[in-house]
Amino acid sequence: MFEYAPAPESRSVVDIKPSYGLFIDGKFVDPTDGGSFKSINPASEEVLAEVAEAGGQDVDRAVRAARTAYDKVWGPMPGRDRAKYLYRIARIIQERSRELAVLESLDNGKPIKESRDVDVPLVGAHFFYYAGWADKLEHAGFGANPRPLGVAAQVIPWNFPLLMLAWKIAPALAAGNTVVLKPAETTPLTALLFAEICQQADLPAGVVNIVTGAGDTGRALVEHPGVDKVAFTGSTEVGRAIARSVAGTRKKLTLELGGKAANIVFDDAPIDQAVEGIVNGIFFNQGHVCCAGSRLLIQENVADRVLESLKRRMAQLRVGDPLDKNTDIGAINSAAQLARIKELSDAGSAEGAERWSPPCELPDRGFWFAPTIFTGVTQAHRIAREEIFGPVLSVLTFRTPAEAVEKANNTPYGLSAGIWTDKGSRILWTADRLRAGVVWANTFNKFDPTSPFGGYKESGYGREGGRHGLEGYLNV
Amino acid sequence: MSERVAVRKTYKLFIGGKFPRSESGRSYIVQDANVALSSRKDARDAVVAARAAVKGWAGATAYNRGQILYRVAEMLEGRREQFVALGVPADEVDAAIDRWVWYAGWSDKLAQVYGGANPVAGPYFNLSAPEPTGVVAVVAPEAPALLGLVSVIAPAIVTGNTVVVAASPAQPLAAVTLAEVLATSDLPGGVVNILTGRLSETVPTLAGHMDVNAIDLTGVADAELAADLEVKAAQNLKRVLRPAPVDHDWFADPGIARMTTLLETKTVWHPKGV
């Protein structure tokens, strides 16, 4: 590998406060019955800030603020004016993009080139896209007079903190709802910066409320009788618990949960392109991606060639400082997540799969895991069935297209899938048979505000993005 | 001449295109007839039949599904008097026939209305299309006996799902008679399966069944039971249609939400290039 001089992005653009309150009714306030917790930089374990932990009363306060804003301001406001606020927010995100990207990389551990080139541009685009829907809802195909639901409770994960916030808040506000959002406890900082952006945009108080905290805060929010809508992105286990907790209520629920996507490489695929797609599929964002291509299915007669090429490519991946512009793979988001990745990887070895990682020096402090592949994986192995949510790829082989489809669908998940082949009819044949919400053919991990995203089966229900993304926030 | 002795009908279950008795050998008296009392095993057998029918039905062309739903309307029209004789008001039978026709027309239009091309910011072909979710368990409403039943079955199957229907325990005869209509409409066996008997026996089994993809609780009048079923359904994250409000107007335009709740949207990306 070439030696590169360090090229760190400056963090001086970000002003992190020593402590943050809850964002309720347009103001930062101290918690009344909660405590606080620390958010750390997973690349160095340095404490970034002390963040308020919302208790039940705080959640109640936030829900009431959202209700009042819905009844008095946001609900009655013409769509044209809601649109203008959303456009303002989109613009401020674009204007402050560097700051958001650096803060995201600091708090989450993802490489700056991803937060700068993928996450933050998509966040701005998402608000821009949904802003335009706010005054066109009657044309969205959900009837002549689609109505908002009211107050939306939204709980998001730590893998794309700001992007998941955008996926939740933009369609909710465009449709005329107000929101209470809980960011993940390991990555609250960009959501709190977003709260400042709402202030800067003069968004009416109470339309967006941010309550920070961990599982208890999320539970209090989701179970609050005053919310009309629950939207959750996270693990299938928690999704199940939420589905149970809203049973018997009139709360509308959308869930975007785990995945174990198959990335299928046929023997006529352009190998170099496929290898780039495989790498992007599993190592993008350290593999902390619900739609990651974590099961590689290679047609048997090209398996050796693909693996050789893949290993050569993996040896070029740079693991290290997330703020370095040359970094390909950043830090694992938390000690807990690192422990889970290690546990499942050890299970892979113990169950008989063969483990390989390129020679790779990892920093002494922080949470790190080298890019890893397992070959000789069978469908019964835990690493072929369970979501690892890390830079770990399980490789299986197949002989016929029918076998590829059979293996690809042999999972309770159904979020995404990949197909690599030069034959158009084979792409369409395969895509038709894959039980997955997003199918990338000769590409992988592409996202766009206009393109609906979401899963089949135990990957959840409802779609985010596109016209479809409005449905979860309208009374249809 | 003595008066002719009528040949009475045996009201049985409808599973996999056949009319079996309950494997439990039980029946109950309702609407002056002995009606099969389904067991949990019958419910599981019905799911197996429904699952087996998914591949063919979901894989059929939308045009073909539309033809078959329209054929159901034709057959129902021909058996109009049978339903009237069961006590279904004539205007309700008419509305049920019309509902089949209405849904038949959706088969090859919904993908155009509900899916489409997405203008992504890059050189990609990007298309979203709806697909059936798979096997749907349906609790039919008690009233209106026929129109309510048709209004929950048709939107589920027109898009390619297969269903296991728990008929109203108090009004099962319309359901069994509708099964006779379906059996003569070129509808492949297993696309619609109908269970009669107690909801408390069959529906919890369906709600907790890991090979059922969605559950329609429309006919569950007891709020506590509905909540319990929704909890069971969460085990494999079934798509859930919650109970209809008591004042629901079954004669009104149904809209498309019944269909779309039981659909998945698949979005396919491909790069453009030379």
Image (cartoon, rainbow, N blue to C red):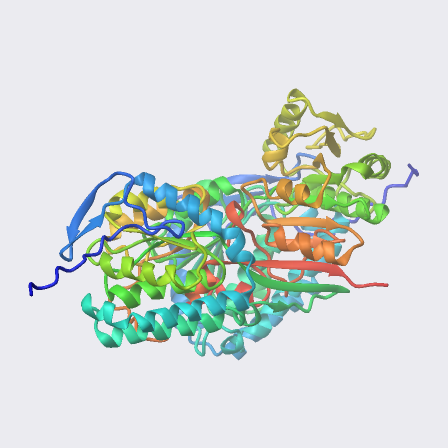
Tell me: residue A368, above or below residue B75. above
Residue B230: x and y in percent read: 35, 48
Q: Is residue B21 visible?
A: yes
The quarter of the picture where residue A476 lies is: bottom left
Lateral position of residue A321 relative to residue A406, left or right: right
Side of A298 relative to B31 (left or right): right
> B227 left or right of A182?
left
Q: How many marks do you count on the picture?
A: 0
Q: Residue at x 40, y 54 (%)?
A: B163
Q: Residue at x 70, y 65 (%)?
A: A95
Residue A68 found in image quarter: bottom left
Locate the C terminus of chain B and report the quarter of the image it occupies: bottom right
Residue at the spot 27% in from the left edge and 50% down from the top edge: B12
Q: Residue A78, position in %: x, y?
A: 48, 79
Q: Work out which quarter of the rendered image holds the N terminus of chain B and state it.
A: bottom left
Q: Farthest residue in the left direction? A: B2
The reply to whether residue A23 is in sight is no
As drawn, the residue found furthest toward the front would be: B1
Q: Position of residue A463 (x, y in %)?
A: 54, 58
The residue shown at (48%, 47%) is B52
Q: Is residue B185 above or below residue A262?
A: below
> Residue A343, position in %: x, y?
61, 26
Front position in the image: A236 or B171: B171
Front-lying residue, A148 or B107:
B107
Residue B147 higher or lower than A255, as above or below: below
